Amino acid sequence: MFRRTGTASGLATALVAAAAALALTASPAAAATAPGFLNGTDLPPHPSSAWYAGEITAGLPETAPFCLDGALPAAGSWHRTFGTEFDTGAVQVSVRSASPAAAAKLVGTLERRVAACAADWLRTTPGGTASWQDYGTLPVEEGAHVYGVHTSIPESEPGVHLYGIGRDGSTVTVVKWGQMGDLSQAPVAAFKKTTTKAVNKLNP
């Protein structure tokens, strides 16, 4: 069943533990060359836990963000992982593209991939249900777009993800937030503020 209104799998507690163990700031060398990144306090507040921010690290995360497997280039990429003491986690990936035109093309690819994610997931998940929502654009730098994706399979916890995709010049960023639940429980208004901050911080 498909509804437009995906966490294919629950967020791993190991990811949260790993994020908590990482240092809160990037190394001086990384900070000198990486785009600006969010801090834990920039994410939608969790009612029962602080956010733990990992290091700003060159390259892509070991596990691609849900919906974006293979869509993000390794060249020019940086990432930062965030976790809480519960099931809520997030990751930000930023890419320095060769030109503003290349960055705009990457944004289009990422937006199409997220918009198609629920339907794509259903095709490979018999018995699952999924929905998605376009939460609109944001007037920041060259623009940003926010989406939501919900997925659920029988006898498993449902999951909800929010995506913020934006660009400043030739630098692109995508922020993915996720936890167990559905779209009605997603902190959309707070996440729009997070996405705006993410784009504004890219090229300080």
Image (cartoon, rainbow, N blue to C red):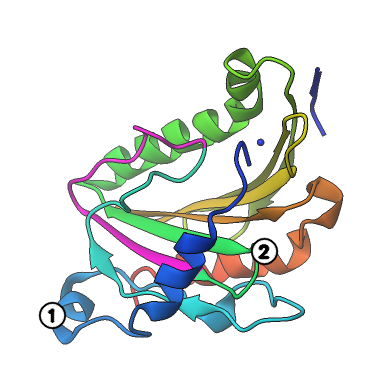
Q: How many marks?
A: 2
At label 1, the amino acid type is Ala
* Placement of the N terminus among the 4 image quadrants: top right
Residue 176 image offset from top left, x and y in percent:
54, 54
Q: Specify which label sits upstream in the sequence, 2 or 1.
A: 1
* Residue 79 painted magenta: yes
Q: Which residue is mark 1?
A: 29
The magenta region covers 67-82
Q: State left or right for residue 119 relative to residue 92.
A: right
- Quadrant holding the C terminus: bottom left
20 vs 177: above or below: below
At which x and y percent is residue 46? 71, 76
State the CA–CA distance, disc 2 to disc 1: 29 Å
- For the residue labelled by badge 2, is the local secondary structure a helix, a strand or a loop? helix
Q: Position of residue 7 (x, y in %)?
A: 63, 42
As rendered, which of 13 and 181 lies closer to the eye?
Answer: 13
